[in-house]
Amino acid sequence: MAKQISVLEAAQLVGEQGGVLLDVREPDEWVIVRAPGALHIPMRQLAASTDRLPAGGTIVCICHVGARSAIVADALAGAGYDAVNVTGGMEAWESEGLPVERG
């Protein structure tokens, strides 16, 4: 089971420690709001897109509130990736005042 981290821990992991923020939400959610620099691969496309994942470093999985990304983080961890899940997802990210892009 992948480790669960807060949005503040996620921002630090991505910003200071070289982690990659993987947003697994659907394209319509991504267009509305997203974290700058996030890698967007919808959950349903991930199995066919693992070549886009970084070979090293931590993959910080995020979705809207943390349910889908928890499934993805667990699957990635089971496949040998260093993956963690962001609890609260983009909803918590935005609530904490962390940077976002829109449109």
Image (tube, rainbow, N blue to C red):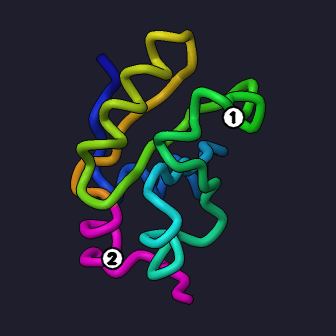
Q: Which amino acid does label 2 sit on?
A: Glu
For residue 72, which quarter of the picture? top left
- In which quadrant of the rendered image does the C terminus lie? bottom right
Residue 46 part of the magenta segment: no
Asked whether the residues under the numbered discs 1 and 2 touch, taking CB atoms below 8 Å apart as contact, a structural biologist would say no
Placement of 96 over or under 2, stated as above or below: below
Residue located 32% across and 30% down the image: 71
Marks 1 and 2: which is nearer the front? 1
Residue located 60% across and 43% down the image: 19
Circle 1 packing at 10 Å, graded few (<14), some (14-19), many (20+), is few
Residue receiving disc 2: 94
Circle 2 packing at 10 Å, graded few (<14), some (14-19), many (20+), is some
Residue located 60% across and 72% down the image: 36
57 sits to left or right of 3: right
Which residue is more in the foreground, 85 or 5? 85
Placement of 85 over or under 62, stated as above or below: above
Placement of 85 over or under 66, stated as above or below: above
Placement of 59 over or under 31, stated as above or below: above
Rendered image: mark on residue 49: 1
